[in-house]
């Protein structure tokens, strides 16, 4: 799985877990819908943006990335 797909999957899981829509997440966290759509469509994400996403869910970047999705053996990293 690509890192972009892993981030998109994690975001989708967190939105569902927290009962949020992409729109409500953006509205509550001052993030553009365009940015979130790009993430959910598996485009490249900057680390700064990942940190803001984690903040939006009240977690640290370490907590966000502490998921089997991001384990090396699960990612197609070249």
Image (tube, rainbow, N blue to C red):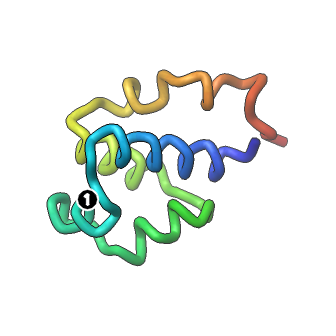
**57 on left or right of 46:** left
The picture quadrant where one finds residue 73 is: top right
Residue 3 rendering spot, x and y as whole percentages: 66, 45
Residue drawn where x is 41% and y is 77% of the image: 34
Residue drawn where x is 38% and y is 41% of the image: 14
Q: Quadrant of the N terminus?
A: top right
The residue at which mark 1 appears reads as 25
Name above or below for residue 70 compared with residue 7.
above
Mark 1 crowd level (few <14, some 14–19, many ≥20, 10 Å Cα): many
Name above or below for residue 27 compared with residue 1.
below
Q: Secondary structure at mark 1?
A: helix
The picture quadrant where one finds residue 36 is: bottom left
Residue drawn where x is 56% and y is 46% of the image: 9
The picture quadrant where one finds residue 72 is: top right
Between residues 48 and 4, which one lies in front from this camera angle? Answer: 4
The residue at the far left in this view is: 28
Q: Quadrant of the C terminus?
A: top right
Residue 24 rendering spot, x and y as whole percentages: 22, 63
**69 on left or right of 51:** right
Residue 57 rendering spot, x and y as whole percentages: 25, 41
């Amino acid at each position: 799985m690509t890192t972009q797909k892993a981030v998109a999957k994690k975001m989708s899981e967190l939105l569902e877990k927290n009962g949020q829509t992409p729109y409500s997440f953006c509205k509550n966290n001052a993030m553009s819908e365009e940015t979130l759509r790009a993430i959910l469509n598996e485009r490249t994400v900057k680390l700064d943006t990942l940190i803001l996403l984690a903040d939006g869910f009240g977690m640290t970047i370490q907590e966000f990335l502490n998921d089997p999705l991001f384990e090396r053996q699960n990612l197609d990293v070249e």
